[in-house]
Image (cartoon, rainbow, N blue to C red):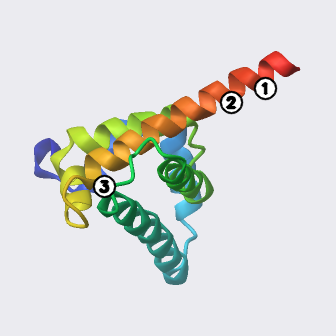
Amino acid sequence: MVGGGSLADEARERWGHTDAWRESVQRTRGYSEDDWARIRAESDQVFEHMAALMADGVRPTSAAAMDLAEAHRRHIDRWFYPCSPDMHRGLASMYTADPRFTAYFEERHEGLSAFVADAIRANATRAREQSERDRRTV
């Protein structure tokens, strides 16, 4: 954490200059307690399903894991800021590089941070490949 401040202060310092930050501030400003409860529940559900896949031995590159990664990306896109697959890939790196994010996932299931990050990366690759196929057929 920068200078011992809050996570919100750190985030503002790191990303406050970005369009995504400004969009997120604008969107979240009007959220009610019920909105925040729904946002948390949706996010928790995605990660619970990811943990279940992992526990069942499903690979993060499976269609099921990538579909959950896509649900997570759309969740961010819906509630916070436009989140392209490439931007989502950047978040995946933070999930494994920042011990605070890693701890958040590891509380749910050991190894979940890497599983989620790998599923996000696989989904971003899938989206890029689909986009390339779409361009070739136009």
Q: Which residue is mark 2?
A: 130
Q: What residue is rendered at 59% in x and 59% in y? A: 27
Of badges 1 and 3, nearer the viewer stands 1
The type of residue carrying mark 3 is: Ala
Contact between labelled residues 1 and 2, with CB atoms less than 8 Å apart: yes
To which quarter of the image does residue 106 belong? bottom left
Q: Which residue is mark 1?
A: 134
- Image location of residue 56, percent across then percent down: 34, 62
Marks 1 and 3, how far apart at CA: 39 Å
The type of residue carrying mark 2 is: Gln
Sequence-wise, the earlier of marks 3 and 2 is 3
Contact between labelled residues 2 and 3, with CB atoms less than 8 Å apart: no
Q: Which mark is residue 37?
A: none
> Measured along the vertical axis of the image, is residue 125 above or below residue 22?
above
Sequence-wise, the earlier of marks 1 and 3 is 3
- Image location of residue 133, percent across then percent down: 74, 23
Which of the two residues, 11 or 99, is positioned nearer the viewer here?
99
